[in-house]
Amino acid sequence: MLNAFLISRRLHTEYKVNGTLNVLRHVSLLRKVLPPDVYSQSWIKSVVQVFKIIGEVFSFFLGKAVYLGIMVLLPCIFLKDKGVEADTAAMAVHILFFMTLLGAHIHNPLFEASEEMFYAVFLLRMDAKKYALSNYIYFLIKSFLGFLVVIGACRAIVKSFALPLYFVILLPLYVVCAKLLASWLNLRFFRRHGSLITYDAPKYGKLVWVFTAVCVLAAYGPVVFGITLPYSVVTALCLAVIAGGAASAVMLYGAKDYRRVLRYIELKNRELVSDRDEAVKAATKESTLKKISADDLDQDAPAKDKGLKGCAFFNELFVRRHRKLLTKTAKLQAAVLALVFAAAAAACLLVPDLAARVNSNILGVLPIFLFVMYMLNRGETVTQAMFFNCDSSMMIYNIYRRPDVILGIFTERLKTLVRINLLPSCVIAAGLPLVYLCSGGTKRPFEYAVMAVTILAISVFFSVHYLTMYYLLQPYTEGLAQKGVGYRVVMGLTYAVCYAGLQVKALRANSLLFGIVVCIFTVLYVAAALVLTYRLAPKTFRLRR
Amino acid sequence: MKLIADGIRKSFDKKEVLKGASFTFEQGRIYALLGRNGSGKTTFFNCLNEDLKMDSGSFCLEDEAGARRPVTTDDIGYVLSTPVVPEFLTAREILKFFLEINEGRIEHPQTPDSYLDWVQIEPEDRNKLLRDFSHGMKNKIQMLLNLIADPLVLLLDEPLTSLDVVAQEEMKSLLKSRKAEHITILSTHIMELALDMCDDVVLLHGGVLTHMERGDMPLEEYKDRIITALKEGYAEGQNA
């Protein structure tokens, strides 16, 4: 087993290091420094490897710290601050207990598809059981140590996190054993039903969603009202799970059907991708590669094509056949935002104190919405879906690259993308002025208008921005890997600018001016982007090789 | 018309794959581009199709009067060995789209169904998503789209390998029947296909293009000559 583990780690390291070197070699400055035979230069690889190991250790502890901080400690401190009468440590333990149950199912890599698993088990024919178990043990040890250190450090640093000392060991052990138990249940389920317990499992997928909701509600619901599980109950439950986990470990060690399960995962994963590039494609965002499901396919399309022709016809079919993938999230965002704004408006009407505070601050939050709109925007996902599901194949045909066709489809897509993004944006554009009105309103009605128009302008700006950047800096390769450094730089800058909207206080003091400037900038940007796309896209919109 | 490749050079890092490849391809003939694995056949096609930027050299078209003009992507149809088609469309829909965006450019356009009859895609398959097509059927659609576009230069990368024997014969006769209007260049590893279907054999070895004159040479001797030439090319490449 140790040997199998060492081989698979070597494969992992080679793979990651070569991948990093490959990325570095695509940066034109570094390309000159790094020779083509860099992959055979052991000292360069060792340097990269050292950085990778440091990065892995760092990100591992950091990951646990961020999880514990954001999901557990912050909510507790916030609730305590709001006057919830419960011990911070008891609340944290309560949340961690239930969230770990959830985590055991959703973050449990024993039966997860990965490129490396495919290479190791199916291409290099390693022993499936030894590969899966040895890597799983490594993962569990990392989890245990990570939680041990982070929980221990939190206990030492955060005064209110004064849980009994034995919890510092009990909780990490519980985390590990919950995962083992979940893996064993998953394997049993597979033996009986031929599929694994996942969100997209054919019959039982919905149950996983229900389980997720129950865990989240059980973790945070009672805590809001100051109710927590007593330490004694948590201890008893943890010990029960640990006993179950230990038994599961024995069962998992004795199980023989790993290859069958891994083959199932691999085949299921391959359904998402079609041909020889499966391993490469699997590494890209799977969500955008979702197959067109039966209910997305409208076989009566010709009868319902509204008389559309050419590019409009083509785009209409693309949108119709990928409707779920393209609009589901935007619809969900719109629904959640509608609820949030309705609740905020109601709160303003019911609580006069709150209304007064909202009224005096609401204009100031407008710049923050630059970042909010950035986070909500579907541009990157939609353009990825366009590439993966359409352009990667169509770009092969020279006719598709004819300027009039590129521009025809660009125009149709722009309308589609603007429409998708306007779903949540319209809710914000209506919701913000509504909350303003309910909080007491203003005597200057143009403030409502500036609010609404600014939000809509930002939405249109992002739609144009993402689509234009996709057409001008088309970053994806035939193998569906992202290659364009230019695209990454532009996306990084976009993030930086939007983040600045959160941080620069001067913007908040001059919100109205900000709104007006954003609107003017959007108009200018859209004009410039369209001209640039029309001029340059026929040259830039092609497959990277 | 003639397609003239003049001094095409292309390197990847330090490896020079095309070392000034030059050749004149004539309309009405089918050329077999033969070369060993990694000899640069696909690179040559990609340079011609403007998918790769070449380091130096040029491609141009020369008409009967001797007037030359650069090759544009409109002049080229590229059929890949692995058929690539948009999987979310049906066969009828992709043809409708193709015909509409080429309105006014296609001489004597027909209906999508008559084109599908032409390549023998069964009526019951025409409203299926291309995703559910077999490899061979996708290949037919890909070939069909390129034939409808009717580019002067047709590049075929291992075009028949995924087709069943009947479809292979159909495709061969289809390409032969259309050869008068095109300059057809077919890259393949299969010697029999090259000799059976093509009028000329061009070797790509050592980064250059060489015409293999057959004259009255018996078939077996001609084959031996090609193999020997390819081996020599490989040996030269190794020594270089």
Image (tube, coloured by chain):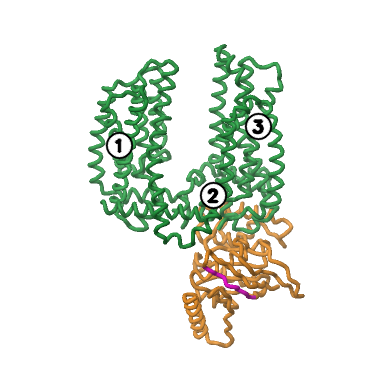
User: Judging from the image, what is the letter of the chain drawn in orange?
Assistant: B
Q: Chain of mark 3?
A: A
Against A462, is B134 above or below?
Answer: below
Q: List x then y, in percent, for residue A420.
A: 60, 37
Q: Quadrant of the C terminus of chain A?
A: bottom right
Q: Please name the color used to draw chain A.
A: green
Q: List x then y, in percent, for residue A81.
A: 44, 18
Circle nearer the N terminus (1, 2): 1
Circle nearer the N terminus (1, 3): 1
Residue B17 is a magenta residue: yes
Is residue B178 visible in this depiction of the protein?
yes
Q: Secondary structure at mark 3?
A: helix
A491 sits to left or right of A238: right
Residue at mark 3: A456
Query: Which residue occupies the foreground of this view, B104 or A185?
Result: A185
Three-letter code, disc 2:
Phe
Three-letter code, disc 3:
Leu
Q: List x then y, in percent, for residue A248.
A: 25, 39
Q: Which residues are magenta?
A: B15-23
Against A435, is A206 above or below?
Answer: below
Against B53, is A10 above or below?
Answer: above
Residue at mark 1: A176
Q: In terms of image quadrants, where is residue A7?
A: bottom left
Three-letter code, disc 1:
Val
A304 sits to left or right of A54: right
Contact (Cβ within 8 Å) of mark 1 with mark 3: no
Residue at mark 2: A388
Q: Secondary structure at mark 2?
A: helix
Query: Which residue occupies the foreground of this view, A146 or A85?
Result: A146
Residues at discs 1 and 2 both on one chain? yes
Is residue A204 visible in this depiction of the protein?
no
